[in-house]
Image (tube, rainbow, N blue to C red):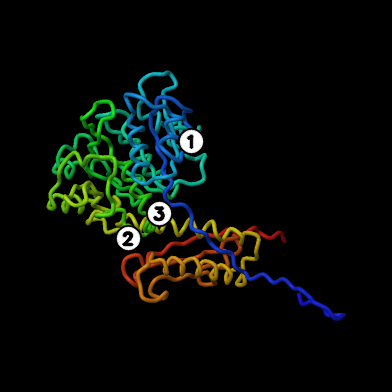
Amino acid sequence: MAVEVSYPGVYVEETSSGIHPIEGVSTSTAAFVGPARTGPIDGPVHVHSHLDYMQTFGSGSPATTLDHAVRLFFENGGSDALIVRVGSSRGGAITDNAISGSRLEAAKRGLWALDNVKNFNLLCVPPLADGTDIGAQTRAAAVRYCEKRGALFIADPSVAWQSARQAMAGVNAAFPTRSSHAALFFPFLQAADPARAGKTMTVAPCGAVAGVMARTDAQRGVWRPPAGIEATLNGVVGPAIKLSDGQNGELNALGVNCLRTFARSGPVVWGARTLAGADQVASEYKYIPVRRLALFVEESIQRGIRWAVFEANAEPTWAKVRLNVGAFMDRLFRNGAFQGRTAREAYFVKCDGTTTSQSDIDAGVANVVVGFAPLKPAEFVIVTIRQLFEKKKP
């Protein structure tokens, strides 16, 4: 509304710019679910260092599989973890039922204790004990839960896979559902045994790989693959099984990411496919960075346009949404997240009458369609964010 000038002087009129900057959400909060010696059961508890973890969940010998996973996460660059300690109510042996039992979801216990936190990005469920695997029900539950929460399950291989050939033969049975919300790494790792000087022990790779992902996010961006010469594995001696280039290629084609050792770099992550990345699946989310970038874009935009909930579900509001989402996507483009020489080749944003029908408006919904080119210019991965509006009373 214009200021009415009735006498000489200085007049101030404040006008909204319509700009609501969208901030990128965290991408590297890792959730760990497993047994520990002490600490609250069915947390989750936030920790920011291995020392934090030990102060809450105990230290000493023998270390649990969860201890090793969390330690390797922080040694490899992780900085933000959620710990869910599971246990038996009767004090007996801990089984998969403590993680994924049928009664836990309603009670928000075990894996579903993570319902009590707003956001996590990576999920690690190490074996319950050395020399064992988590059960099929837990693997399946972890994958489904990550699909629901927009996270990535970092899966460990089976202890029975003592060769590349056994891994190739067993992967389809272990993971019958080829989800883009899960990634499998092989083989186990060898690390120094703190309880036996000069000796090594076999540890699950999930914690170390989660740490590499967190480090890659911080140093290069979530759109960069957490693999290659720069994806060094700290705190370990090397993979428990040595793989050849040929075996690496065969495993990669099945959606299995290999852990390798090279003379100049030492142990590294040497693959960045999701379980939907097997050659026969042909998913647009074949690669971990594409899947995680899409999740990052979706969550960031979803949170960043919440201001619109009390606005009118009409073109003036849609224009503001396009402005703010476009600014966010352009910032990612300039940071190197997308392919293309121009913004037009790299991304697009739509929120108008072509994406939102009259029935959507009547239901209090507007659809924001965002496309981005993660691998090749103008070859877009498309995500749709549904913005809910408060329905106006007649």
Q: Position of residue 223 (x, y in %)?
A: 37, 59
- Label 2, label 1: how many angstroms apart (C-alpha)? 35 Å
Nearer to us of marks 2 and 3 is 3
Density class for disc 1 (Cα within 10 Å; few <14, some 14-19, many ≥20) is many
Where disc 3 sits, the SS reads: helix
Task: Check disc 2 and give the amino acid type.
Answer: Glu
On the image, the x and y values in percent for residue 15 come to 69, 72
Which of the numbered marks, if any, corresponds to residue 282?
none
First of labels 3, 1 by sequence position: 1
Image position of 6 (left or right of 63)? right
Q: Residue furthest front?
A: 197
Mark 3 or mark 1, which is nearer to you?
3
Left or right: residue 223 versus residue 163 is right
* Residue 284 numbered mark, or none: 2
- Residue position marked by numbered label 1 in the rendering: 45
Measuring 54% from the left and 72% from the top, which residue is drawn there? 353
Tell me if mark 2 has few (under 14), some (14-19) or many (20+) residues whose alpha carbon lies within 10 angstroms of its own: some
Select label 2 or label 1 by which is in front: 1
Tell me the residue at 24%/26% (across/down). Answer: 196
CA separation in Å, label 3 and label 1: 23 Å
- The tag on residue 218 is 3
> CB under 8 Å between callouts 2 and 1?
no
Tell me residue 6's x, y (percent).
Answer: 87, 80
- Up the image or down, 98 lies above or below 210; here it is above
The answer to which quarter of the image holds residue 339 is: bottom left
Residue 326 image offset from top left, x and y in percent: 50, 69
Q: Secondary structure at mark 1?
A: strand
Q: Which quadrant of the structure image shows residue 69?
A: top left
Q: Element under label 2?
A: loop
In this rendering, would 132 be left or right of 218? left
